[in-house]
Image (cartoon, rainbow, N blue to C red):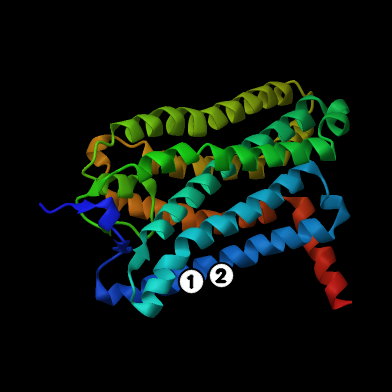
Amino acid sequence: MDTINQANLSHFVIQGISDVPQLQVLIFLLILLFYILTLAGNTAILLLVCLNKNLHTPMYFFLGNLAVLDMSSSTITLHKPLAMFITGNKKTPFSSCMTQVYFFSSFTSNELLILTAMSYDRYIAICRPLHYTLVMKHETCLSLSLLCWLLSFLEIIPYIVLLLKLSCYKSNIINHFFCDIVPVMKLSCSDTSALEVLIFTEGVFLLSFTPFFLTCISYVFIIVTVTKIPTSLGRRKAFYTCSSHLMVVALLYVTLFCQYLRPASQDTLDSNKMFSLFNTAAVPVLNPIIYSLKNKDVKSAAKRTLARFKG
């Protein structure tokens, strides 16, 4: 089998979601619809948070961060299949591919960290309500947000460094609809053991399980506190304040675990494409819907904003 030296590798070819010609129009329309809904839904969340003072709270500040991440992640991944359908060009420069790997991985890592910060906010609100305004000050929220963004962009750098050190590739055809680290790594004929160890140690344990573990700890304390509330109405009200966040957390982690932590015998790039498509196209659409339908504050703010514009 002929190999390609990285020095001679000018571009990758993105295979796309499906090679079936009859499905191309349908796939394009579905991705375009999801992308438009993602931009519309998350922009609406951002506008509601900015325009309504009663939403100027830590939870909605972090929700605004989540909305920016959803739009950014969808844009960095879905623009290629949309452009491929319009132009017919499946080539992407090597540098652009590495950039896409970096930003997509950073956005995913950041989303897990932001959701962890939101779980901490819910923990303080329910378990230490008298200290809430003192602990979750604007400066604290801003610092947590900046820390999440900084960590997520720094911790992906080692992956890119190791990816750039791969000296040869068996092919330049990526069996995916965007450049992701695993499909690119599997194309290499170089020794990828260091990168695989990094993905397993830092990627699985530090970037995934640590936020998951911290989120679980917050909810353990929340559940213990809620069970001590004497009235059923009080318990329902406390759980209701966490329901939207809990649904978003469950949706994201289930998708990521199915995509990256399945048994090796079931791990195929074609099936990973489907999980990636759900994660990058459907989840960013569902997040604002979940927060809108499950949150009275958001629905009330939307009604006030619409009434203000009508007036």
Q: Is residue 162 above or below residue 99?
A: above
Q: Is residue 99 above or below residue 167?
A: below
Q: Nearer the viewer, residue 160 or 88?
A: 160
Residue at 80% from the left image edge and 58% from the top image edge: 50
- Circle 1 is placed at which residue position? 32
The type of residue carrying mark 2 is Ile
Residue at 51% from the left image edge and 34% from the top image edge: 207
- Circle 2 is placed at which residue position? 36
Judge from the rendering whether residue 33 lies leftward or rightward of residue 291; answer left or right.
Answer: left
Location of residue 114 by image quarter: top right
Camera sees residue 27: yes
Q: Nearer the viewer, residue 292 or 210?
A: 210
Judge from the rendering whether residue 247 lies leftward or rightward of residue 169; answer left or right.
Answer: right
Q: Is residue 19 above or below residue 109?
A: below
Location of residue 14 by image quarter: bottom left
Which element carries disc 1, helix, strand or loop? helix
The type of residue carrying mark 1 is Leu
**The disc label shown at residue 191, or none:** none
CB within 8 Å, label 2 to label 1: yes
Residue at 34% from the left image edge and 42% from the top image edge: 165
Camera sees residue 300: no
Residue 184: x and y, percent? 32, 49
Location of residue 123 by image quarter: top right
Residue 79: x and y, percent? 47, 67
Judge from the rendering whether residue 224 lies leftward or rightward of residue 69; answer left or right.
Answer: right
Tell me how far mark 2 sits from mark 1, CA to CA: 6 Å
Residue 141: x and y, percent? 77, 39
Q: Residues within 10 Å of mark 2 (few under 14, many from 20)?
A: few
